[in-house]
Amino acid sequence: MRKNTYIGIATIVLIFGIIVIPKIYKRIANDDVSRGGRMHQEGGEKINDAPDGLIYINQGGVDRKVPPFSFVNQDNDTITNADYKGKVYLVEFFFTRCTDICIPMSHNLIEISKRFEGRDDFGIASFSIDPEHDQPAVLKKYQEEYGVTNPNWNFMTGDRSVIRKLSNEGFYLATNEEGDESDLYHSGLFALIDQNGFIRSRLDPYGNAKPYYRGFVPMNENVPEGGETPEIDILIEDIQKLLK
């Protein structure tokens, strides 16, 4: 049974890579999302590290920030982007009925949360792309099933079109387009946000901005040649950089 589960997850990840990732990078390319003025590139070499070793994600000469949002969480409390001010936090889009990539995503977030347990300056924002089903009571049960104890980890629900806009236009983390109800899909990536609401990341080995982290690949996974490598360890490193 366990072997069949891993095969199923591998199949979903493959399909995800074929369908969703090209959408994300098309959005990024069309909107000129690149390294900010704090990083420059000549001949493929980085020449100026950002002060904390991380870059700002730049679009049209402006460092990208989290857009304003307001949703209801698992406790029926209204949560806005202002509640995360002064905190380093992660953003994901998920849904509770997901039986494939959401499972390793949630386990990865649990492990990350444990690393920063007790810190009031770290949080997680999980937005459901299935809000009609994922009402506060459902999200509360999901929180309890995963043993989430971080008070700054909010599972949020709201208007579907608003959540889709936040995902597709605010973060460029692809989800279903408006009117596409055939399946629920999402990117499986995590965004890292600093204390001032800016989206942060690092450069890839080629000197290009790497806006997101693979949240759907389990930690310490043995990856076959050509497979998707885990990125949770480097994400933890980058969270630590921002928290210093």
Image (cartoon, rainbow, N blue to C red):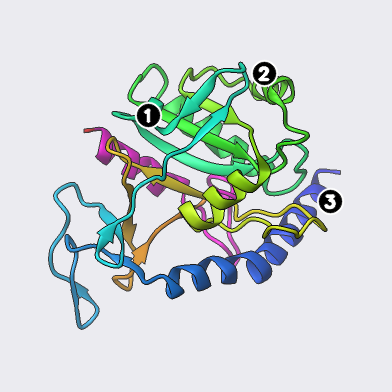
How many marks are shown on the rendered structure? 3
In the image, the segment drawn in magenta is: 215-243
Q: Please tell me whether residue 8 is drawn above or below residue 155 in the rendered image.
A: below
Nearest the camera: 111 or 134?
134
Q: Secondary structure at mark 3?
A: helix
Q: Residue at x 75, y 52 (%)?
A: 184
- Spot occupied by residue 244 in the image (x, y as percentages of width and height): 21, 33
Compared across the picture, whether 164 is left or right of 132 comes to left
Q: Secondary structure at mark 2?
A: helix
Image quadrant occupied by the N terminus: top right
Q: Judge whether residue 225 can be spotted in this image.
A: no
Q: Please tell me whether residue 63 is drawn above or below residue 108 in the rendered image.
A: below
Q: Earlier in the sequence, mark 1 or mark 2?
A: 1
Q: Which residue is mark 1?
A: 82
Q: Residue at x 43, y 29 (%)?
A: 123
Crowd tier of the residue under label 3, counting other residues whose Cα lies within 10 Å: few below 14, some 14–19, many 20 or above: few
Choose mark 3 or mark 1, whichever is in front: 1
The amino acid sitting under disc 2 is Glu
- Spot occupied by residue 90 in the image (x, y as percentages of width and height): 44, 39
Q: Secondary structure at mark 1?
A: helix
Q: Which residue is mark 3?
A: 4
Q: Residue at x 46, y 22 (%)?
A: 152
